[in-house]
Amino acid sequence: MIFAADGAPDFEAVDLSDDLSFKHGFPHPFFTWLRENDPVHWHAPTPITPDGEGFWVVSRYDHAMEVLRNAEIYSSDTGGDRQGGGTTLKDERAAGKVLNYTDDPHHRVLRSLVNKGFTTQAVGRLEDELRRRANLLIDDFPIGRPFDFVAHFSRELPLQAICIVLGVPQEDRVQLCELIDNGLEAESQNVLAKEYFVQILDYARGIIAEKRRNPRDDILSTIVRARLDGAHLGDTGGRGLTDEELTNFFVLLFPAGAETTRSAIGGGLRALIEHPEQLQALRDDPDLVKSAVEEFVRWMTPSIYKRRTVTRDTELAGQALKRGDKVTIWEMSANRDGLVFDEPFRFDISRRPNRHVGFGFGTHVCLGAGLARLEIRIAIEEMLRRIEDFELAGPARWVPNNRLLGLRELPLSVTMKEENK
Ligand code: HEM
C-alpha cells in the first residue's frame, strides 16, 4: 500500500472498483486509514469504474449498520433516476427482479417463497447427512502427501449441501461449480464472463423445466409451484413465478451456497493452522466450536462489500449523500473496526461478543447463514475428531475479486489419528 508523506494513502493507487487491487488480499492498511480519517469516503471514478460514476465507501461498523438498517433510504433495488441498480457497483438491469436486488414489500414476498428450505428446522434435518458426507470426503484425503483441501473438502461440502437443498442432481455439481468459478475468474481478469453466465442460465432453464414435470421435496420444486401474492404489485389473486423469476432464483442461490462457505471453511482452517495455540484451545474445549464458527466468518468475511442506492438526500457521518448516489458498505472493514472488536486483527476462536456483519444485517441478512454455520461447524468437528496433525503444504491461491473472497487452492498435508486410519 502506498502512503504519501502526510500519512494519507495514495488514492490513485487503490482503485476499489478494480479487482486487481485485491490480488494481494484485502487492502487492510488502506481501510484502517479510512476508518480513522475518512469513514464515509468519496471514491472518484477511474477509467474502469462501472458506469463511470464515483461512489461512497463506508468503512466503519456503525455506519455500515446504519446503512443496512435503513433500507428505505439505502435501497437494494434502485434510487434517483437510474434505470438499473442492485447490490454491486455496476447498475444491473435485474434490479427489482431478484431477491437480493429488491426492497420490501416485494423482497419479503420473494424471500418467503424460499425461506422454507433454510429455517432452523430444515437445516437441522440436514445435519446427519452432511456429517456423513463430510466423513466420506475425509476418508478420501490422500495420506502422507500434499493435496488440495479446496478440491477435496471445502468446495465439496457446500456444493453437495446446496444440491440437496435446491434439488440439483449431485452429478451436475462439479460442472456447475466450474462454470461459476470460471465466470468469476474471467470477471477478475476483465475478460467477458458472459459465455459462462449463458451456460448457467441454460442449465437453470433445464432444471426448472424438469421440476415442473417432476416436482420433488426441494426448494426449486417449491418455487415452481408457488403462487406469488402480488397484491403489492397490483396483481390480484396471485400468480405463478415467471421463468425469468425462477431462473433468477437459481442463479442467485446456487453460487451463494457454493462460493462463500468454501472460503470460510478453507480460510478459517488455514488461520487455525497458523495459530496453533487456537487449534489446541479448540481441541481442549470442543464447546468453543460455536464461537470458532463465528470467528471463521468474521476473520474471512468471504462476501466483502455490498452496494446500496440512496433514495433521498441524506447525511451519513457528516457527508451529504444525494438521491441516486451509490453507497458501498465494506463488511470486511467493518469486521476489523477497533471501535467494536477488541484487537480486531487477532484471530480468536473464543471471541465473545462477536457481532460481525459477515452475514450482513437487516432485511437482506444472509438467508443461508444457518446452513453455512452448520457446514462450518461440521467441518471443524469432523476434522478435529479424525485428524491428528495439519500442515500447510504451500501458499493458498485466491481469485482477485473485490466482491467475493474466492479461495481456489489450499495445499495441505494431514496425519490421521491412529483410530481413524
Ligand atoms: C460463510 C458463508 C456465507 C456468507 C459469508 C454469506 C454472506 C451473505 C451476506 C453478507 C449477505 C447480505 C447481502 C446484502 O446485504 O445485500 C447474504 C445474503 C444472502 N445469502 Fe449468504 N452468505 C453465506 C452463505 C450462504 C449460503 C450457504 C446460502 C444458501 C443458498 C446463502 C444465500 C444467501 C441469499 C439468498 C442471500 C440474499 C438474501 C436477501 O436478499 O434477502 N448464503 N449472504
Image (cartoon, rainbow, N blue to C red):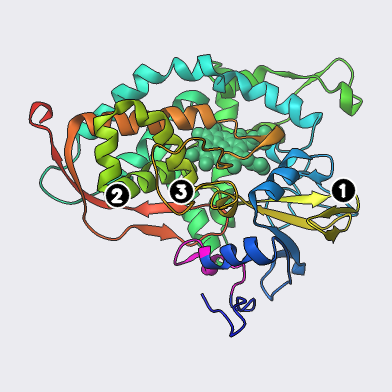
**Which residue range is magenta in the image?**
14-28
Residue 178 shown left or right of residue 135 in the figure: right
Label 1 beta carbon within 8 A of ligand 1: no
Kind of residue at badge 1 = Thr
Q: Residues within 10 Å of mark 1 (few under 14, many from 20)?
A: many
Mark 3 beta carbon near ligand 1 (under 8 Å): yes
Residue 341 in percent (x, y) is at: 53, 46
Q: Is residue 115 left or right of residue 341?
A: right
Q: Residue at x 10, y 46 (%)?
A: 144
* Some atom of ligand 1 lies within 8 Å of the CB belonging to the residue at label 2: no
- The quarter holding residue 55 reads bottom right
Q: Residue at x 67, y 66 (%)?
A: 37
Residue toward you, 239 or 108: 108
Query: For the residue marked with disc 3, what is the amino acid?
Result: Met
Q: Label 3: which residue?
A: 300
Residue 394, above or below 128: below
Task: Look at the picture and state if 266 lies above or below 82.
Answer: above
